Image: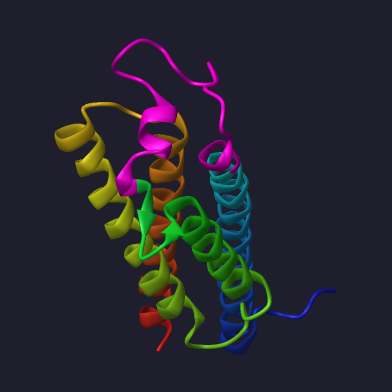
Amino acid sequence: MQPAMTPRTLDSLANDSRGIGQRRLMSAIALIAVAGAIVSSVSLYHHYRTSKTAFCNFGASFNCDLVNRSPYSIVLGVPVALIGILGYLLILSLATIYRDKAETPFMLLIASVGGLCFALYLTYIEKFVLAAWCILCLGSLTLIFSAALLSAVLAARSLRKR
């Protein structure tokens, strides 16, 4: 015979399912961060290559070489792709090493929204200044948007728990 479900048992089950949901969100954010670091690494590799490549040149509208080697691809002497790698590694460390800390969902939200704002600025430069798109940059924009969205869900859930 099984014991009856008490309110205390139901509460612990609800907390366990929230914990599983939070772990899944953190894992998804971590995977997105790994993918972002890889995309940014490929972009950094193409930034430093001296020869032109046909890697993602699809006519005048899509030209990674033009975007990756423009004056806008460097901020204060640091390649934008390297900034992306460091940002994604920060998000990865928050979603893995620091995942159990209470403030982590909010730190993830701040980091990913900051990255999203920077990516949107760079997308503006691509569209209105360079008039060329970079597939790698658009891929990174999609990834950081996804990380920001999942971080917002995680932060909202964390607020509800309190």
Residue 63, x across and y down, in percent: 39, 23
Q: Residue at x 44, y 68 (%)?
A: 154
Q: Is residue 144 above or below residue 153?
A: above
Front residue (pair 18, 50): 50
Q: Residue furthest front?
A: 50
| Magenta stretch holds residue 66 | yes
Q: Is residue 17 visible?
A: no
Horizontal side of 82 relative to 77 (left or right) equals right
Q: Residue furthest right?
A: 1
Q: Residue at x 55, y 45 (%)?
A: 44
Q: Quadrant of residue 129?
A: top left
Q: Residue at x 33, y 66 (%)?
A: 114
Horizontal side of 162 relative to 4 (left or right) equals left
Q: Which residues are magenta?
A: 45-72
Front residue (pair 64, 30): 64
Residue 143, x across and y down, in percent: 46, 46
Q: Residue at x 57, y 56 (%)?
A: 33
Instruction: Tell me which colouring the rendered structure shows.
Output: rainbow
User: Which SS type dominates the magenta stretch?
Assistant: loop
Q: Quadrant of residue 111?
A: bottom left
Front residue (pair 109, 120): 120
Horizontal side of 46 relative to 115 (left or right) equals right
| Magenta stretch holds residue 137 | no
Horizontal side of 111 relative to 26 (left or right) equals left
Residue 119, x across and y down, in percent: 33, 51
Q: Is residue 144 above or below residue 109?
A: above
**Where's the C terminus, which quadrant?**
bottom left
Q: Is residue 26 above or below residue 140?
A: below
